Image (spheres, rainbow, N blue to C red):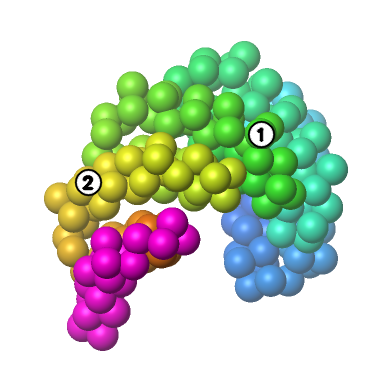
Amino acid sequence: GFRTTFGNDHPDTLGLINNMGLLLKKQGKYDEAEIYLLEGLEGYRRVFGDDHPGTLNSVLNMGQLLKAQGKYAEAERLHREAIDDYRRVLGDDHPSTLAAINNMGLLLKTQGKYGEAEPYLREALDGNRRVHGPDHPNTLAVVTNLGALLWVQGKDDEAERLLREAIDSYRRVLGDDHPHTLNTLNSLGLLLMGQGKYDAAEPYLLEVLDGSRRT
């Protein structure tokens, strides 16, 4: 295959090695994925150096795998390394930098480090709004992430405002029955229920039920 034709250090080979690792990760075969992602990362570093986009992506992919394996301390270290490198090489507002910042926020949230996670998700949201605008899928994903984080912190008012903002955009961009719309409607319904606002929550949860049946 590619290894014998082009050699291990050819960009196409490295791309395939990396993709193989990502595929195995998606299948939940984390130990096998780690072998490929490490080989891809070491190859990119050796051939292209630390600041090549392929190397930067490989660092982040490795960090995401470590998160999936529950190796949070190592995952955090790699995410911080990736963010620092992305900022230096691509700038604060590059989509890859913003994605790395969002991922770091989610990693910290997974560990229950809500206070540490919040500034990352706020920065990711501000950047995405600036770069992509309010209705872009990347922006909406971060709006939802930050809304969910604020909710678990008990910051209900701002969480509700963000979830409503996301719902309006999702309806406009993706339609009423899209899974993202329904998931966010469900989150808003649960948030209102948690506040004891059952009458306010009911129409949202009924809409989720009807939409889920339809789709």
- How many C-alpha atoms fall within 10 Å of the one at disc 1: few (<14), some, or many (≥20)? some
Residue 49, above or below 39? above
The numbered mark, 2 or 1, whose residue comes first in the sequence reads 1
Q: Is residue 133 left or right of residue 21?
A: left
Residue 32, above or below 167? below
Per the rendering, the mark at residue 169 is 2
Per the rendering, the mark at residue 115 is 1
Q: Quadrant of the N terminus?
A: bottom right
| Residue numbers of the magenta segment | 194-215
Identified at 57% across, 50% down, the residue is 152
Label 2: state its secondary structure. Answer: helix
Q: In front here: 206 or 50?
A: 206
Gap between marks 2 and 1, in whole Å? 27 Å
In percent of width and height, residue 205 lies at 30, 71
Residue type indicated by callout 1: Gly
The image shows a total of numbered marks equal to 2
Identified at 79% across, 58% down, the residue is 70
Label 1: state its secondary structure. Answer: helix
Q: Main secondary structure of the magenta part?
A: helix
